[in-house]
Amino acid sequence: ASAKDVYLDLKNMAHNSSFFLSKTELDDSTVKSRLRLQGDMFYGRKVQMSMLLHLIQSSALTGNQPLMATIAGYPGTGKSALVNQIKKPLTDLDECFVEGKFDKHARPDAVLASALNSFFGKMLESNEGNKFMTMKWRVCDVIGSVSNNVMFELLPNLQKWIADDVVAIDDPSKCSSPAKCPSVKGIGTSHRLKFMLCRLVGAIACRAHPLVLFLDDLQWADEMTLDIIRMMIADPEIHHFLLIGCYRDNEVNLSHPLTETLKAIKKQGISPVSIKVGPIEKECVNTLLSEALCMPPSLCRPLANVVHNKTGGIMLFVLRFLASLNDDGELWFSMSARRWVYNLEGIKLKGIHDDVVSHMTKHMERLPKTMQMGLKFASCLGPRFGSTVLERTRSDDEFEDSFLESCVELGFLQTFGSDEYIWAHDQIHQAAYDLIPLMKRESFHLLVGSRLFMATKPPEMKHMIFFIVDNMNRGSDLLDDPSHIYELSRLNLEAGEKALSTSAFHSAAKYLLKGLSLLGTDSWKTNYSLTLSLHDAASEALFVTGDYSRLSILVEEPLLNARTFEDKLNLLNNLVRSLTASSEYEVG
């Protein structure tokens, strides 16, 4: 090391004496030479943080109109971590924070509702009812101004929060007893839902409690959610509101729905603030290593240079690569030197995969077989699942009782609430899923869905239906028993009707059309009631989503085979309305 390096190290130690000069505690992890790296480690990004904090202050102090920021970058660069850094300033400013995350394998049209429902769930747990009483009255004004209670079905925690100590709305019984969602009444329901969600956001956000809505992975957002975003940002009745959206710019081209939405927002005279997040610099990697290894920066610099070159500065890749170095014995804690040491020449020669997913999959393949099996089952349950759901997929001792705890310790999963888990990153989720051989994925999904179905009692079915159907559908081509195919078709009807009840219309159409595709050519004779119900519900979903051409084809068969005029009535109603709507669209 040069004299300058020594001087800088001493200066750093003097500035952070409690960190560098404290006695090294040889805890269990250190003795076992286990490197502890937090998944939310954050370095650099000063410019991006400054832009976000400025927007937060503007929305809180001025708040004349809604504000929007988009954060774009390659997967794993730390877009979500950047937003997580603002949570503390938000708390200091008494702001409300609502967050949702899209997933390419999950139902995108349920993300916004789920995020708002989680927010009201936290409000229930906070025991700060008096603090938010004014907000509660504003929300009551919004909910009480409509003659139906579809919002309570969509946001059950909202109903509980209002019913907690408020009964003075249009119909008090709505707040004290479970609400039953009315049947879908067509495209008006979709428009009314968008309007009501905008009104609800406007009721939450105020000068005393500004609102930040964070939506992650917008590249997978559905058109309805994107339209709600456009409506919220252009709504003059919404104040003290900031929407932050993250997306992968390498997956969003000029014709992508998100691009079209951003163009539409700009045409309305609103300019979202664009924030780019790229790889971190070598010096940031060096700082990360210095703090993680409790070593002076000069001793970490050779390792930082190699790590940065091999990972390209992608934050997630950096963390997983360091973990693999520790696992492979290239980075370890020396008991004799009482500090971390590394084999620089061995690390230089170490091969590395082109992307973080392949690297993590190879890393996972070296874990114990029981751990790998647990990761395979968990990866089939989507971005968020409960421990009881995972337990129902297990037979005998396929994975350990401590599996979830181990996943959290290894940084694969994070706890969410009291009994739920989410993947630390969707790239980690993908890596776990890639453990399942491509040729065996259909059979594995069928196995997971079947086990969940067999372990679920009828009263629990409404909470488990999506886990069951999503998996069984992906393995449906392997079914050959007519009774099993019929049962899966019935389950798709149940899933579709539940999706309709929560206004997830695109997802509902997907389930209902899948249920129809499973039926045999003689289903009108052998399973008349199921066949008619699927056609009925599917026609509703297709009408609301505006898929009129498919709807006109769909109704041909039931109009020929339905036994009574009453059985045809709903189908004819949807057909007429679709023809009217499509002709109005063409004229317009």
Image: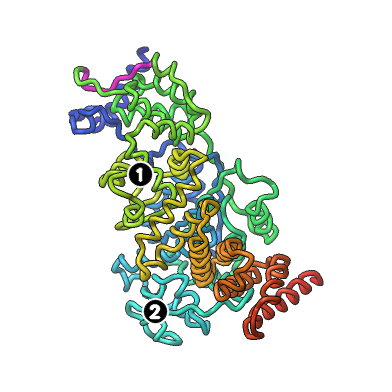
Element carrying mark 1: helix
Q: Which colour scheme is used?
A: rainbow
Give neighbour class at mark 1: few <14, some 14-19, many 20+ (Cα, 10 Å): many
Give neighbour class at mark 2: few <14, some 14-19, many 20+ (Cα, 10 Å): few
Q: Work out whether residue 28 or residue 199 is closer to the camera in this orientation and state it.
A: 28
Separation of marks 1 and 2 at Cα, in angstroms: 37 Å
The answer to whether residue 561 is above or below residue 398 is below
Considering the image in quadrants, where does the N terminus appear?
top left
**Residue 131: x %, y % from top left:** 33, 70
Residue 342: say if magenta: yes
Any part of residue 55 in sight: no
User: Which residue does the image show at 50% across and 62% down from the upper left?
Assistant: 488
Determine the image quadrant of residue 529: bottom right
Residue occupied by mark 1:
374
Determine the image quadrant of residue 517: bottom right
The answer to whether residue 477 is above or below residue 63 is above
Q: Taking 300 as reference, is 576 left or right?
A: right
**Residue 105: x %, y % from top left:** 52, 52
Element carrying mark 2: loop
User: Which residue does the image show at 37% across and 81% down from the upper left?
Assistant: 177
Residue occupied by mark 2:
178
Q: What segment carries the magenta color?
A: 337-344
Q: Taking 466 as reference, is 6 left or right?
A: left
Q: Tell me the amino acid under the disc marked 2.
A: Pro
Determine the image quadrant of residue 567: bottom right
